[in-house]
Image: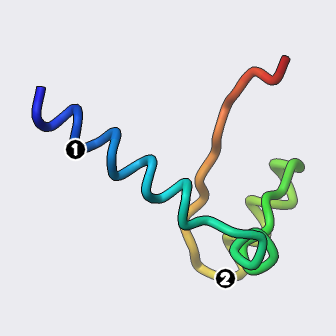
């Protein structure tokens, strides 16, 4: 219970701290091929988020 509450609080704090400047520095890509190529050229890992938008 305590770890679940701590996780929720950390996620909420992260969401509150995020701002428009962060989205400008870290743009989300919607093209998987382009994202893979960019990650490969920068030698960075790739984070893929699957979600359903209503």
Of tags 2 and 1, the one toward the viewer is 1
Q: Which of 47 and 37 is in front in this view?
A: 47
Q: Residue at coordinates 55% horizontally, 58% vertically from top-left? A: 16
Query: What x and y, as percent, mark residue 54?
Result: 85, 17
Residue labelled with disc 2: 42
What is the quadrant of residue 37 in the picture? bottom right
Residue labelled with disc 1: 6
The reply to whether callout 2 and callout 1 are in contact (CB within 8 Å) is no
The chosen color scheme is rainbow
Q: In which quarter of the image is the N terminus?
A: top left
Comes first in the chain, label 2 or label 1: 1
Q: Is residue 11 left or right of residue 17?
A: left
Vertical relation: 29 (above or below) 45: above
Q: Residue at coordinates 59% horizontally, 53% vertically from top-left? A: 47
What is the quadrant of residue 20 in the picture? bottom right
Vertical relation: 29 (above or below) 12: below
Mark 2 and mark 1: span between their CA atoms? 33 Å
Query: What x and y, as percent, mark residue 44?
Result: 57, 74
Circle 2: element type = loop
Q: In this view, does 3 lie to the left or right of 7?
A: left
> Neighbour class for label 1 at 10 Å: few (<14), some, many (≥20)?
few
Q: Residue at coordinates 55% horizontally, 54% vertically from top-left? A: 15
Query: What x and y, as percent, mark residue 7?
Result: 28, 42
Q: Is residue 12 left or right of residue 37?
A: left
Q: Residue at coordinates 70% horizontally, 27% vertically from top-left? A: 51
């Amino acid at each position: 219970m305590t770890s679940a509450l701590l996780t929720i609080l950390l996620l909420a704090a992260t969401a509150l701290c995020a701002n428009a400047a962060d989205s400008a520095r870290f743009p989300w890509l919607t093209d998987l091929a382009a994202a893979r190529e960019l990650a490969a050229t920068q030698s960075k890992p790739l984070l893929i988020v699957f979600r359903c938008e209503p």
